[in-house]
Image: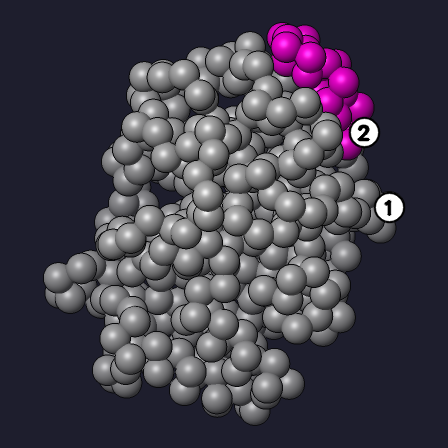
Amino acid sequence: MTDLIHGHTAPGLDRVRAAFAENFADGLEIGAAFAVCREGEMLVDLWGGHADRAGAKPWEHDTIVPVFSTTKPIAAIVIALLVERGLLDFDAPLSQIWPDFAAASKDHLTLAQVMSHQAGIPGFIDPIDPTLWLDPLALSAALAALSPLWPPGTAHGYHPLTYGYLVGEAVRRCADGRSLGTILAEDICGPRGIDFHIGLAEAHDARLGEMQRPTELPQLGAITPIKRAAFLTKWAGPDRGGRRWRAIEIPSANGHGTARAVARLYSFFAQGGRIDEQRLVSPAVFAAATARRAFGEDLVLPFTTDFAAGVMRNSSAVYGPNPESFGHSGWGGSMAFGDPKTGLSVAYIMNRQSNNLQGDPRARRLIDAVYAAL
């Protein structure tokens, strides 16, 4: 398998390559990539294995896969950029720019509360047509009318998919009709050559990795109506993976890219609002974007969560040893984080999905190797 491991590690980081190879040797991977960036320098850029389940197509330097909820903080970077430009305000009610969102006692909910999973609308209790998820405008309208599952702003519970439609609609209403994915492409990724997409053009399909879904459901603890609405109904999400799903923008779940692209984007969180050497937002806006907005028992996930505006704060030490870090995980095991203490941003992606909600052992092995080598 070592002949299927490619890429480079900076001097002193050989143990990271060894850890990456061990994941394959232990039979935990089909294909994967891992990247570590510091101030624009790619210290680790590894990829290996196969991009298809049959093992016939090598994982290449430019293979991309969906990173699912690891997309959420990338969407949050776009929101922070629009706050910097004066087009959005973290502490203003979302209903100011989206009047219909005021329905069912949601009028006072601020953008930051929505981004920290306090809105009370993680899913639909009553049945909907699952294809509605493939129509962002219609789905957003349904969310605006929806009654919250708890008094909004009084608690938090992870919004696995609805987060993306809420922030996507906020952007659409304030940015002269440009979508969140368009702003990400035109203002952030394109000028910097970052290979990440929310809304994937068909031209990229040829280099798309084939996903193997988990064989077991994640452990959610005692199942409540709130958890069922978020994850477990037949209408809790669309059929993921088709061309239509890839093409539309779901800023909570369908970002596609390489590990090096994800690591470069998460450097925003490692460098106080900069990507590479370029500042996107002021220190004041970065502080507002990363301030604690919700902390404690999560009504959807089976553990304590600590949310800023769209990104998790690392109080549980899932994203490296430093509590100052900001990160997120995606369905099946992808993860990324930025560590302001060391300046490192780290990203792991793969195509064999596990049922771990956070702390996938494959990623932990790699993170531990990075910090052991520092």
x, y (%) of residue 176?
63, 19
Q: Can residue 19 be seen by looking at this rendering?
A: yes
Q: Residue at x 34, y 59 (%)?
A: 354
* Quarter of the image where the C terminus is located: bottom right
SS type, badge 1:
helix
x, y (%) of residue 49?
26, 71
Instruction: Choose the circle earlier in sequence order: 1 or 2.
Output: 2
**Stretch in magenta:** 88-110
Q: Which residue is mark 1?
A: 284
Query: On the image, which quarter does residue 309 sit in?
Result: top right
- At label 2, the amino acid type is Asp
Q: Is residue 344 left or right of residue 350?
A: right
Q: Is residue 369 left or right of residue 82?
A: left
Q: Which residue is mark 2?
A: 91
Query: On the image, which quarter does residue 84 sit in?
Result: top right
SS type, badge 2:
loop
